Image (cartoon, grey):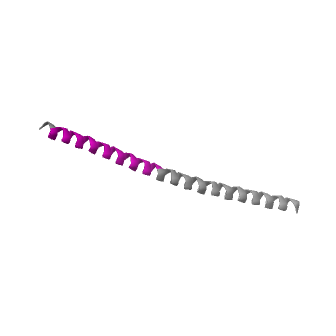
Amino acid sequence: MKKLCATLMLAVIAGCGVETATTAATSAEIKRREMEQAKKTMEQTTQKIEQNTQQMSDRAAQSADRVKD
């Protein structure tokens, strides 16, 4: 009876460890995906800022050309 009880307790403890490891792995995967998405968003935002900066520079140059004429 003692062996059966000890075996059951060992199985329960082992099961908890597996669940904890699975939860940790799932959380890590979610965080990895969030980081990838954040990186993509940052790259897109940087590109938009560069495009807008270029447009502003082009407009300023066009205005300067008009003033010279």
* Left or right position of 30 against 11: right
User: Residue 34: horizontal and vertical position, in percent?
Assistant: 48, 51
- The outermost residue toward the left is 1
Q: Is residue 64 left or right of residue 44?
A: right
Q: Is residue 62 magenta?
A: no
Nearer to the camera, 28 or 44: 28
The magenta span reads 3-31
User: Residue pushed farthest right?
Assistant: 69
Q: In the picture provided, is 65 more to the left or to the right than 23?
A: right
Q: Can you say which quadrant of the picture contains the C terminus?
A: bottom right
Q: Position of residue 58 (x, y in %)?
A: 76, 60
Q: Is residue 40 left or right of residue 3?
A: right
Residue 53 falls in image quadrant? bottom right
Foreground residue among 30 and 24: 24
Q: Is residue 8 magenta?
A: yes
Pinpoint residue 31: horizontal percent, then vertical percent.
Answer: 46, 48
Is the residue 68 above or below the residue 31 in the image? below
Q: Could you tell me which residue is drawn at 31 percent across and 43 percent down?
A: 17
* Residue located at (36% from left, 46% from top): 21
Residue 38 in percent (x, y) is at: 53, 51
Write the residue at 19% across / 41% down. 7
Q: Splitting the image into 4 quarters, where does residue 57 fall? A: bottom right
Q: Quadrant of the N terminus?
A: top left
Q: Nearer the viewer, residue 59 or 44?
A: 44
Q: Main secondary structure of the magenta part?
A: helix
